[in-house]
Amino acid sequence: MNLLRSLVPPALRPVARRARAVLRGLAPVHHAGPFPPADLRAAVRPVRALPPLEAGRAFEVALSVTNHSPRAVGPNGPCPVGVRLAWRSYAGEPVAAADGFAPLPRPLWPGEELARRFTFPAPAALGDYRATFALAQKGGPDFEPVGPPAVLDLAVSHPLDGGFNYHDIYGRADLNRDFWTASGPPSRAEFERLAPVKLQLLTDRGLTPDGRILDVGCGTGLLATAAERFLSDRGAYFGTDLAPEAVAFCKGRYRRPNFRFAVNGMTTVPVRGERFDAITFFSVFTHTYPDETALLLAEAARLLAPGGFVFADAFTSPLVQRHAGSRYAVEVNREALLRLAGLSGLTAERVVDSPWNGPARREFFAFRRG
């Protein structure tokens, strides 16, 4: 091939290349069945890194593909050739996400390089993934890679990034007409049903009617509703929330003298000189990022009475290296979460869990001093 190219005068080489392209376009490249695996070689190279992907949505990746095989390959026939995408976890373990396949846009001849954008679906589950791209035949073998494997570390985030604002939820709510939806339950009946369920999780850990509760993220009083019926006059309830509207509503609704409410910061709790037997973060760590969660756990450790416990839920996923998602729903690596608790001197007991999204779970933990 190099000898033939040397016989063409330099001035005529662009014309020769165009003529070759025309002839190749007329030549059929049709794959009716799988190739034998011998002599199938190709180089695939990512052209640039990608920003976080949106879960379940299609994305484009720019790839350079070079055919090092002695045969032409293309997208036509029952067994087309294209780029296969294989998903693995950040640790290299198999995942439930289906592999992707994108056919070549045109035939690729021996020694020819093609630079194009290929489209694949992102996994539905949030996480930190390792994506490997290789030339392959649909229904046939993968090509042996020439050079380093084409691997990209890709973060898959939540499709509702930026669409959740806690202050806006309370700013738009009419709490005199509907106080339950802002706290999560879709109906007043569900609000009333969940109130004793939350309290039971605490009494099972040893909370008594004389206990002192700090409810961080109290909302419109889901736990306060149950605590109002449960606590004795020697007990105490202190609810805090980011939304001033929620705090104002609770002050007007729960009027027992041993009930108090205040606005807290994102990572601070406005309490000094007191200790609590039960400190709760219901549906709080599901919306905070790890650094914020660590600071809130430190606040809890500061305010925890001897023998007391911290109760919290979080979305955990084996696909997440540290965290993924947005304020709408933050998924974390469980071991990383437990290490953050350990930095505050707390050890964790998993109490209960339930399905969340794909391999992610909603886990409830009781934290105590180690």
Image: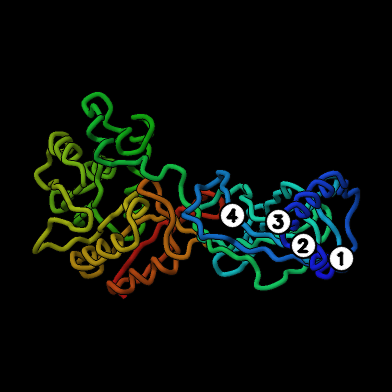
Q: Earlier in the sequence, mark 2 or mark 3?
A: 2
Q: Residues within 10 Å of mark 2 (few under 14, many from 20)?
A: few
Distance Cα–Cα, label 2 vs label 3: 40 Å
Determine which residue is flagged by label 3. 84
Of the residues shown, which amino acid type is indicated by label 2?
Pro
Could you tell me residue 19's position as x and y percent? 80, 49
Question: At numbered mark 2, what does the secondary structure look like: helix, strand or loop?
Answer: loop
Distance Cα–Cα, label 1 vs label 4: 27 Å
Q: Which mark is residue 62?
A: 4
Could you tell me residue 330's position as x and y percent? 40, 53
Q: Earlier in the sequence, mark 1 or mark 4?
A: 1
Relative side of 107 to 131, left or right: right
Is disc 2 in contact with disc 3, using a CB cutoff of under 8 Å?
no
Between circles 2 and 3, the one closer to the viewer is 2
Which of the pair 219/25 is nearer the observer? 25
Relative side of 202 to 104, left or right: left
Is disc 3 in contact with disc 1, using a CB cutoff of under 8 Å?
no
Q: Which mark is residue 37?
A: 1
Q: Is residue 281 above or below residue 228?
A: below
Q: Earlier in the sequence, mark 2 or mark 1?
A: 2
Question: At numbered mark 3, what does the secondary structure look like: helix, strand or loop?
Answer: strand
Distance Cα–Cα, label 4 vs label 2: 34 Å
Between circles 2 and 1, the one closer to the viewer is 2
